[in-house]
Amino acid sequence: MTVLLRVDREHPAPEPIARAAAVIRAGGLVAFPTETVYGLGANALDSDAVARIFRAKERPTFDPLIVHLVAAESLREVVSHVPDVAVALAARFWPGPLTLVLPRGPQVPLAVTAGGDTVAVRVPSHPVAHALLAAARVPIAAPSANRFGRVSPTCAEHVLADLNDRIDMVLDGGSTQVGVESTVLSLAGPVATILRPGGVSREALARVLGEVQVAQELPTEGDSLISPGTTLKHYAPRAVVLLYRGELVPVLERMRHDLSQHLARGEKVGLLLVDEDSPAFAEFPVTTARLGSVDSLEEVAQQLYGALRILDQAGVSVIMVRDLGSEGLGLAIRDRLTRAAAGQVIVVAEGTA
Ligand code: TXA
Ligand code: MG
């Protein structure tokens, strides 16, 4: 039985938080909202509890977890060395959707880091996550609260759809704001490197760091894995995802062309659409999930995973969507859609529609 407790997003009541903290301290599993997606938390210093996370998610043990801290002051409890650049980044972006990969402290069990000598850490800004960390008084290891390889959860219903009866408790604090996961930035090597684009943009990091490197911007099957969890066929719905990339007009033309062909074959097609594109597809008998305006990538990121789940539930076999560029949150959106498409990116050249 998974206990569901509703909590106010801004001012979580102490009683449900205390119950959740007790579960964490006893070695149990609690899903909780962060500003990015829901996490599946366990006491990061208890390797048995951490092992339960991997079992509940059916996550391979080679994929390390992020350790969540109540404040940057707790960094020294879990990392062996805090470089100056980490202090500067923490001051600018914590609490918030930035994860730093740093040298692992001896207190952190190898189960958390998948046997590695680095540990990923972040301080979440969500009031419920903050209250839980404060009450538990231990760092909390938490991956996204979905079954491995599935779309990350942005509300409690998504968590239960994947993990009901596999975990002890869900704190329901409503929908998450950012909607895509944190940016994972490695400070373990000579150059700061984005291992996973996310809620903090490359441009924002560059304003603090100067130059930032992005690892594996477009991964291909068989690439060596720098961040072990960034496998292709990740964040994937059941349907086949087709991601179209190129200039707007030929891309829309090509999508309309391909859509007609899929429909002619009797397939059930779903469209992930920004509002501005919907007139181009008005005449087609398809299921559409809206992502909001292309002028607000914040809104698109927030809607993305829920929209993918809606199309899956509608039973479509193909999902068509277009790339929205690489500026700001666009890079994270592109990364997740590329993975959902398992590398099936259809690059449309000018004049070939
Ligand atoms: O927004 C988020 O980051 C959410 C919330 C719950 O905090 N968490 C999340 O965790 O997305 P997860 O486990 O789904 O993704 C963590 C990513 C994986 O790609 C993993 O491989 C990478 O971080 N990672 C964790 N520890 C690492 C390490 N020591 N070195 C390199 N990559 C690491
Ligand atoms: Mg995940």
Image: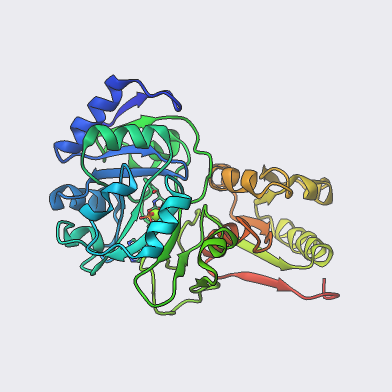
Left or right: 66 in relation to 51: right
Front-most of 335 and 109?
A: 109
| Residue 142 place in picture, x, y as percent | 31, 48
Q: Residue at x 14, y 49 (%)?
A: 46
Q: Position of residue 111 (x, y in %)?
A: 19, 59
Residue 335 image offset from top left, x and y in percent: 55, 63
* For residue 340, side relative to residue 271 (left or right): left
Say above or below: 207 vs 90: below
Residue 352: % across, % down: 82, 75
Within the image, what quadrant is residue 171 found in?
Answer: top left
Give the position of the N terminus as an image quadrant. top left
Q: Nearer the viewer, residue 287 or 34?
A: 34
In the rendered image, the vertical position of residue 79 relative to residue 31, given as above or below: below
Rendered residue at 50%/34% (across/down): 175
Is residue 105 placed above or below 216 in the rendered structure?
above
Q: Is residue 201 visible?
A: yes
Quarter of the image for the C terminus: give it.
Answer: bottom right
User: How is the structure coloured here?
Assistant: rainbow
- Front in this rendered view, residue 62 or 182: 182
- Name which residue lies at 34% across and 71% down: 188
Q: Quadrant of ligand 1?
A: bottom left
Label total for image: 0
* Residue 141 visible, this orientation: no
